[in-house]
Image: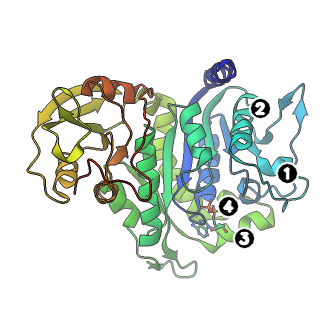
Amino acid sequence: MEQAGQQEAEIQEFLKSVKRVFMVMSGKGGVGKSTMAAGIASALAAKGMRTGLLDIDVHGPSIARIMGLTGLALGTVNGKIQPYPYSDNLKIISMQGFLQHSDDAVIWRGPLKIGVIKQFLVDVDWGPLDALVIDSPPGTGDEPLTIAQFIPGCGAIVVTTPQGVALADVRKSLNFCRQVGMNIVGVIENMSGYVCPECGHHAAIFKTGGGEALAREFNVPFLGRMPIDPMVVCAGDDGVSAMERSIAMKAAVDEIVGNVLLDEVTEEKVAKGENKMEKIAVPVAGGMLSSHFGHCEEFLFATIEAGKIAVVENLVPPPHAPGVIPNWIADQGATVVLVGGMGEAAQQIFQSRGVAVVCGVQSGKPVDLVNQYLAKNLAVGGNSCNHDGDDHHGCGH
Ligand code: ADP
């Protein structure tokens, strides 16, 4: 307990010297998440922002390669880990810098990984930063969860490719962000068509627009798109960064950073929770959280502005029938639902409609529960969601 308190204090101290933290995420590997993280960090640095680029993918670090830093070796001075000074404004830390050989495998489990992520935040000589860009491994495992817990004001940038398989995984990432209460800065669509270097013709290899449609569906900003450019692939191997080699990459990332991210850093908008569009639904019976999701008396909908409850409405749901209530909740514009338990079918509807489900919520007054969720101290236990063979009690079917 004491150790956890000290850890938190160290992280709070570190966060005082960083204006804005972004975590770049993706639902699955190979969509260009690390390439985009490197590009965003480079573009922010080029615009004069003191930027840190932190690769927390301990199992498959790729930032060093993407930045053209083969053989990256990092060490400590006076007990502080020294980041690689890529340029005046850009410092880089990657697990790669601590491996003897570039193809060494790291086989740590959860607690060790969490320890090393914490070290990469507090034990590194970052100096004051305007922006820290974190490249997390794909998916929603220990690493992004650790960052969400350590850095509550962190903003998620979600990278996807336009095709359906990748988009399905991105839904999980967006739902994860909502479940842990992390700001979603927006979605980037990578590998969005191919621009022929000879004639400039744009071919939509995987279709385009999937990322933008998904962003619209989840009511989160669409940050921009980046086409496939063969120059990106060979850059790192030639010892230069993709940003230096690919004109298309530089143009796309400059636009993304110029349009949105620079403002985020200079105005610290998301840190203050200003761009958070949330509506939280809670099933209610007798003025308290109802454990019977499908049979509650009414739903409380709390609209959140600037991180606080702005409007509260109580609405009576339509009569109970398979799938009706989850769809009705989504139609009200809810982004999160707090419940005791919920069956698989209802969860699937919520997932496909972009509504995050927080399960295992204990009894309490709905407004108190919403406030606890916003303060990130909502107690959840006895989670009857997310289990195979779930007993389907209180479900919406
Ligand atoms: P992730 O971090 O999602 O696993 P990476 O950033 O490592 O993905 O990219 C996977 C591969 O795709 C790399 O070889 C990278 O060079 C390539 N790549 C990424 N984005 C593009 C792009 N827009 N055009 C061409 N190749 C790309």
Residue at (51% x, 46% y) in the render: 257
In what quadrant of the picture does the C terminus appear? bottom left
Q: Dot 3 corresponds to which residue?
A: 234
The front one of 126 and 336 is: 336
Task: Looking at the image, tell me whether mark 2 or mark 4 is earlier in sequence order.
Answer: 2
Q: Residues within 10 Å of mark 4 (few under 14, many from 20)?
A: many
Residue 116 rendering spot, x and y as whole percentages:
74, 39
Residue at (36% x, 55% y) in the render: 215
Query: Element under label 4?
Result: helix
Against 278, residue 122 (above or below) is above
Task: Looking at the image, tell me whether mark 2 or mark 1 is earlier in sequence order.
Answer: 1
Q: Dot 2 corresponds to which residue?
A: 124
Q: Dot 1 corresponds to which residue?
A: 72
Q: CA distance from mark 2 to mark 1?
A: 16 Å
Residue at (64% x, 19% y) in the render: 5
Q: Nearer the observer, disc 2 or disc 3?
A: 2
Confirm or reject: label 4 Cβ below 8 Å from ligand 1: yes
Q: CA distance from mark 1 to mark 3?
A: 18 Å
Which residue type does callout 1 highlight? Answer: Leu
Q: Nearer the observer, disc 2 or disc 4?
A: 2
Q: Dot 4 corresponds to which residue?
A: 242
Confirm or reject: label 3 Cβ below 8 Å from ligand 1: no
Q: 129 left or right of 179? A: right
Task: Looking at the image, tell me whether mark 4 or mark 1 is earlier in sequence order.
Answer: 1
Residue 175 rendering spot, x and y as whole percentages:
41, 50
Q: Quadrant of residue 238?
A: bottom right
Task: Looking at the image, tell me whether mark 3 or mark 4 is earlier in sequence order.
Answer: 3
Task: Looking at the image, tell me whether mark 1 or mark 3 is earlier in sequence order.
Answer: 1
Residues tagged 2 and 1 counted as in contact (Cβ below 8 A): no
Q: 271 left or right of 393? A: right
Query: Element under label 2?
Result: loop
